[in-house]
Amino acid sequence: MDPFGDPRPADESQRFCELERSLEGISPRTLSLRLRTLEEQGIVERQTFPEVPPRVTYALTDKGKDLVPLIDGMRKYGMEWLAAEPAEAVPA
């Protein structure tokens, strides 16, 4: 699974609309801003194809792929601990 939450391998590129569908609730503007920031940081690579209509894909760089195990670990931790019911307080 890639850091965007898509079950496809992290080395596969995705179009903007595919990313938007995989990130439930994100606005197109927010996604566009986040992708631009990730591109500036060297985490995501944007590739534009000279077609009509224009086709743009996004893929993780090597730097981005190195983050996948960290993000997967945080996702696992969140699912295990943040979804758990709060423990009852023990009376003193």
Image (spheres, grey):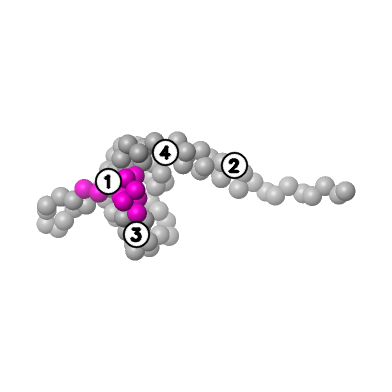
Q: Which of marks 3 and 4 is nearer the N terminus?
A: 3
- Distance, label 3 to label 1, CA atoms, is 14 Å
For marks 2 and 3, give the CA distance: 30 Å
Identify the mark at residue 80; answer none if there is no mark. 2
Counting every numbered tag in the picture gives: 4
Identify the secondary structure beneath mark 2.
helix
The image position of residue 55, as x and y in percent, is 18, 53
- Is 56 or 22 nearer to us in this picture? 56
- From the top left corner, tell me how far across and down residue 62 is, in percent: 32, 36
Q: Taking 30 as reference, is 58 left or right?
A: left
Is residue 38 among what the camera can see?
A: yes
Q: In this view, does 33 lie above or below 81?
A: below
Secondary structure under tag 1 reads strand
Mark 1 Cα within 10 Å, few/some/many (few <14, many 20+)?
A: some
Residue at image coords 36%, 56%: 34
Residue receiving disc 4: 68
Q: Is mark 4 on a helix, strand or loop?
A: helix
Q: Quick check: 78 left or right of 24?
A: right
Question: What range of the chain is rendered magenta?
Answer: 37-47
Asked if the residue at tag 4 contacts the one at tag 2, i.e. Cβ–Cβ closer than 8 Å, the answer is no
The N terminus lies in which quarter of the figure? top left
Circle 1 sits on which residue? 45
Q: Is residue 18 visible?
A: no
Q: Which amino acid does label 2 sit on?
A: Glu
**Residue bearing mark 3:** 33
Mark 3–mark 4 distance (CA, rounded to whole Å):
20 Å
Residue 17 in percent (x, y) is at 29, 55
Of the residues tagged 2 and 4, which is closer to the observer?
A: 4
- Circle 3: residue type: Leu
